[in-house]
Each structure stands twice: as C-alpha cells, then as structure tokens.
Image (cartoon, rainbow, N blue to C red):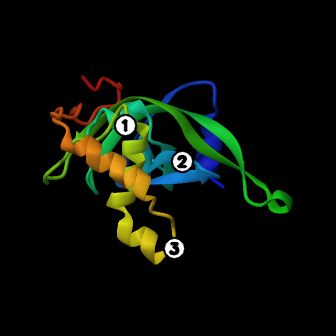
Amino acid sequence: MRRQLAHLGSQDRHFFQGTFVRTGYKSYRDHYQPTLLLRDIYDDQHRLITDHLWFNYTLGFLQLGELLVGDQLQFAARVARYEKGAYLTRQTDYKLAWPTQVCVIRQVKGTRQPVPVTDRHALIGYIMMQNAAFYRFHDRLIDDYYVASFRQWLAAPHTTPAPKTAPRRNDGDCS
C-alpha cells in the first residue's frame, strides 16, 4: 500500500514529478483504455512517494507529444483510494488521479513522432506497436485493426508540436 499517498489526503491537489517508463493499456472485454507508467514519483518536497504508478493516458499527457523513456514530467493530481486484487482478497490502495498542469521538466534526446491525440483507435495501435515485443513475449493481444488504424493515421500529414516544457519548479507553472 502507498501510505505516503494516504497521508496527503484527497481534498487538495498536490504537485508531483515522475519519470516516464512506457505506455500500455487496460482491457475490459473488447474495450481498451490507454495508460502510461511513471516511476520514482516525488512530491513537491522531493520526497519519494512511490516507486511507480500507472495513469490513464489523458489529454494532458497526450498533448506533450511522444514521450521517451527517461523524460521527467511534472503534474498536479489528487490522491484517490481504490480497491485492487481479486474479489476475496481485495485491498485498499492509493493512486494519483485527475492529473492536470502536465509538463516535461527534463526531456531526453531522441527522435519523436506525432501521437494520435484525438483518434483513440490509432492511439491503441500506437501503444500496441510500441510494446509489440513485450506483448508477444507475454501473450498479450496485438490487434491488427488498431495497428492498421495507427498506420493509416500516421500516413496522413501531421506536425509534431513542441512539448510543454518548463524548468524544475514547484509552483505548477508549466508555461
């Protein structure tokens, strides 16, 4: 359990920093929810809150463009309680939810491609292609429909917007 998060409470937004690891998805029958993994989550006092957290891949993250392993992000979020585990062994845990004011505070060097911000099927295809080796090794589905959606989206002209970046700050101003 993430006791550090529990102590922060859920009433206020707090600022956090974390390092991007990879994208992913949660599946519910035939529905996919894009996610992303951050590691080493620190609060605004530079205290390690947790070693990792999965987030929904929301618009705030998508608007940063393609994230590369090692990019450091800053965001504001609320602490939320949730139940994890199987029915008879459920446990209460804590997560960070509703991230806002998302920005890159340190960007690794590398080539970045556009990310489908408004096309959910293409985004799932992007995630499946980015993680293809991992998904094959773990017998996870790579759906040709979503991969084709991403390839079709990628074939159309796009510009890669500059990610929202900011120097390391605690006031949440990512402009």
Q: Residue at x 41, y 70 (%)?
A: 134
- Residue 66: tell me if it is visible: no
Tag 1–tag 2 contact (CB < 8 Å):
no
**Label 2 sits on what residue type?**
Tyr
Mark sitting earlier along the chain (3/1): 1
Are the residues flagged by discs 3 and 1 in contact, CB closer than 8 Å? no
Left or right relative to 106: residue 29: right
Q: Which mark is residue 105?
A: none
Q: Is residue 167 left or right of residue 80?
A: left
Element marked by disc 1: helix
| Residue type, mark 1 in image | Phe
Find residue 67 and report its horizontal and vertical position in percent.
28, 47
Name the residue carrying label 1.
Answer: 61
Which residue is painted at 82% across and 62% down in the image?
A: 89
Q: N-terminal of the two: label 1 or label 2?
A: 2
Q: Nearer the viewer, mark 3 or mark 1?
A: 3
Measure the C-alpha gap from mark 3 to mark 2: 16 Å
Q: Residues within 10 Å of mark 2 (few under 14, many from 20)?
A: some
Mark 3 → mark 1, Cα distance in angstroms: 27 Å
Q: Determine which of the numbered discs, if any, sits on residue 32 in the image.
A: 2
Instruction: Provide the residue designation for mark 3.
Output: 139
What amino acid does circle 3 point to? Asp
Characterize the local packing of mark 3: few (<14), some (14-19) or many (20 or more) Cα atoms within 10 angstroms: few
